[in-house]
Amino acid sequence: MSAGGDVYAKRTLDFIERIQQLRNYDEICGHILKEMEWFGFNCVTSFSVPTAGQTLKNCLWMNNRPQDYIDRYSEKNYILHDPIVTEFRRTIHPYSWSEIRNKRDLKKTEKAIIDEAREWGARDGFMVPIVTRSGSMSGFCPCGFEPNLSSRARAALEVIAIYSHHALIRAVLQIQRDEISHTPLTPREREIMQWVAVGKTDDEIGEILTLSNSTVASHIENAKRKLDTFRRTHAVAQAIRLGEISL
């Protein structure tokens, strides 16, 4: 986006400045919804792809779609056939619902899932995949009746989506950290768990830190105990959730 008199650039920068100052989860959600309304969206879903030991419910950072539709979507297990979700697994580039509806050779059942959303005022939506350096995937998806999906709007929405998603995660994690007390990891335990999080084995971690395998394993066990977990994957997820390590 160019600077100057571009209304989209100005709105995007103003939004970023304001949301960076917010800490309260409800205020952040309200601010995001207000901004999305300007683009013609009335609902927002922000989520992360579940890792081992997690469910989608625990990875939803924001979702204000009508409860009746959420219940029906879950009961009919639409997630297995939803073309918007299928496309999310295939690409890391933003796309609109209408693009999938019009440009893909969809089955009748797939088209029906997209069209059913119109019952609650969502004729189109915009999915922004968010990828971390470790390869984990998240998504930010606003939808509405007649949203603005011009090229300038899409560029602005991609930036707003990323900042909104991270603001939501920070707010949720802060709530969880305030609710859960735990024995902090030592610097060495934190360092080792950081390497575990990126997939290093005990042998590899030992070589990197010049430690024996038994010492590495001992630190990992201590970390698991402090994090109240039994498996390494759960320990990594808990350490991230508590802010002990990051990806």
Image: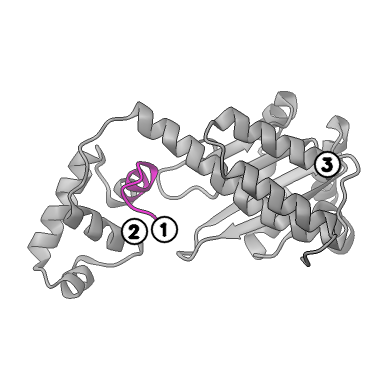
Name the residue carrying label 2: 197
What stretch of residues is rendered in magenta? 236-246
Q: Amino acid at mark 2?
A: Ala
Tally of numbered tags = 3
User: Which mark, by number, is residue 247?
Assistant: 1
Q: Nearer the viewer, mark 2 or mark 1?
A: 1
Crowd tier of the residue under label 1, counting other residues whose Cα lies within 10 Å: few below 14, some 14–19, many 20 or above: few
**Residue 218: image location, x then y, percent:** 11, 54
**On screen, 49 above or below 171?**
below
Kindly give the residue lying farthest to the top in the view shown. 68
Q: Residue at x 77, y 65 (%)?
A: 1
Could you say which is closer to the camera, residue 60 or residue 54?
60
Label 2 vs 1, first from the N-terminus: 2
**On screen, 199 above or below 139?**
below
Q: Is residue 36 left or right of residue 182?
A: right
Kindly give the residue lying farthest to the bottom in the view shown. 207
**On screen, 53 above or below 102?**
above
Could you say which is closer to the camera, residue 10 or residue 141?
10
- The span from disc 2 to disc 3 (Cα, nearest Å) is 39 Å
User: Which mark, by number, is residue 38?
Assistant: 3
**Residue 139: image location, x then y, percent:** 63, 51
Q: Residue at x 66, y 44 (%)?
A: 79
- The span from disc 1 to disc 3 (Cα, nearest Å) is 32 Å
